[in-house]
Amino acid sequence: MNHSRITGWGKYIPEKCLSNLDIEKFVNTGHDWIVSRTGIEQRYIANDDENCSMMAVKAIEKSLEQANRSASDLDLIIVATNTPDYLVPSVSSIIQHNLGANCPAFTVVTGCTGFMYALITAHQFLATGAYSCISIVGVDTISRFLDWNDRTTCVLFGDGAGAVVLEATNKPYGIISFDMGSDGAKGMQLAIPGFGSAVKMDHAMLNRGDQFLSMVGSDIFKFATRIVPPTIRKIVDAADLVLNDIALFVPHQANIRIIESATKELVIDKEKIFSNIHHYGNTSAASIPLCLIDIVAQKRVNIGDYLCLVSFGAGLTWASAIVRWGTHLD
Ligand code: UT7
């Protein structure tokens, strides 16, 4: 079996930064509430000329450059997003075309866990030897689907894209173990009800606000804190490691209190838990790759380190993986 390692990484963040103080000006909320309840201080919001495919292409191009690869080297592109350019065609084909790549491409829609689902899927293609070089991008423009009058959702999310290049290797790097799960019973607790075949697209739909993201925040909070400890234990055991062997825990950035509460039960040293939610807010499918890219930029990871990536979100879904860090530079 081949291993798979991350050989390139790149991000695209929209230019427009929206601070909590900016949001205070048009919604009944406050900087102190947002920071104390979520840890978020600011987020980036796509301008009209920035969309899902455009942000993804920019992030992938940077990741290819880092990996010393070009689009023509790609065997597959997997796009994780909940906010594609269109319902049809798939945004993955738009991205493939705009990159100038000549390979298959598909989109994964599993809420904030999309990047993890995509990474784990890509690993299977590399481990079997079917492919040798895959681009994975987590990208979301949730801002387009927010009701900017709804303080319970609009303060939480930000836009962005993070991409990695995953390549086959015989060295023992990459995904060592993983876990994925889905519990659709409570799926509508975090949903954009409009735009699909379940809802007729008419004025009534728009008047109800079905085009906007809706969320029962407290239930998602409970789900996340319940699911994170067992999925971490499962992958650490499966990798034949103990929690102390993990150099850095990289959780989905939805709420700093979820991260604290979910990791408290595992008694993890705070220094070993990465967070950048204060800077980006919740970027959904882009959350984990943006963490990875910041971790590398901040030199928080060394060759051979074990990273524990863990994500949860709409569906409801969860996904986690132990990744042994090793790039083409080692
Ligand atoms: O990426 C995966 C998906 N998302 C998540 O994982 C998010 C999970 N949920 C959460 O992070 C939290 O539940 C929230 C941040 C969404 C809400 O925090 P909370 O501590 O659970 O607050 P709450 O919903 O219990 O609301 C407490 C109060 C309410 O007022 P009353 O009813 O007590 O008077 C809300 O109306 O806070 C109020 N509130 C706000 N106040 C100021 C809710 N949003 C805001 C706001 N500014 N933005």
Image (tube, rainbow, N blue to C red):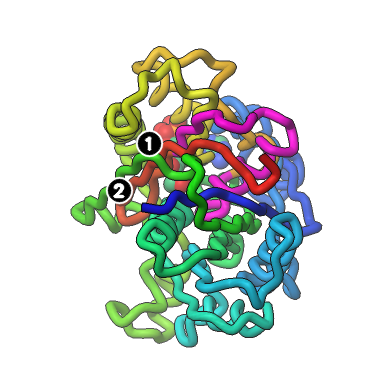
Residue matched to label 1: 221
> Would residue 221 be visible to someone looking at this image?
yes
Which marked residue is nearer to the observer: mark 2 or mark 1?
A: 2
Locate the C terminus and report the quarter of the image it occupies: top right
Q: Tell me the crowding category of disc 2: few under 14, some 14 to 19, or many 20 or more residues within 10 angstroms, Cα based.
A: some
Left or right of residue 323, residue 237 in this image: left
N-term-proximal mark, 2 vs 1: 2
Left or right of residue 125, residue 7 in this image: right
Q: Position of residue 327 (x, y in %)?
A: 63, 45
Left or right of residue 197, residue 88 in this image: right
Q: Position of residue 249 (x, y in %)?
A: 50, 29
Q: Nearer the viewer, residue 73 or 12?
A: 73
Q: Hey, what amino acid is under mark 2?
A: Met
Question: Relative to 46, does residue 41 appear above or below in the rendering?
Answer: above
Q: Nearer the viewer, residue 37 or 2?
A: 2
Left or right of residue 87, residue 240 in this image: left
CB within 8 Å, label 2 to label 1: no
Distance from the alpha carbon under mark 2 to that under mark 1: 18 Å
How many marks the image carries: the answer is 2
Q: Hey, what amino acid is under mark 1?
A: Phe
Q: Residue furthest right?
A: 15
Quick check: is 298 in the magenta stretch?
yes
State which quadrant residue 53 falls in: bottom right
Q: Which residue lies at the image location 32% right of the left edge and 26% below the top edge? A: 240
Quick check: is 83 in the magenta stretch?
no
Residue matched to label 2: 180
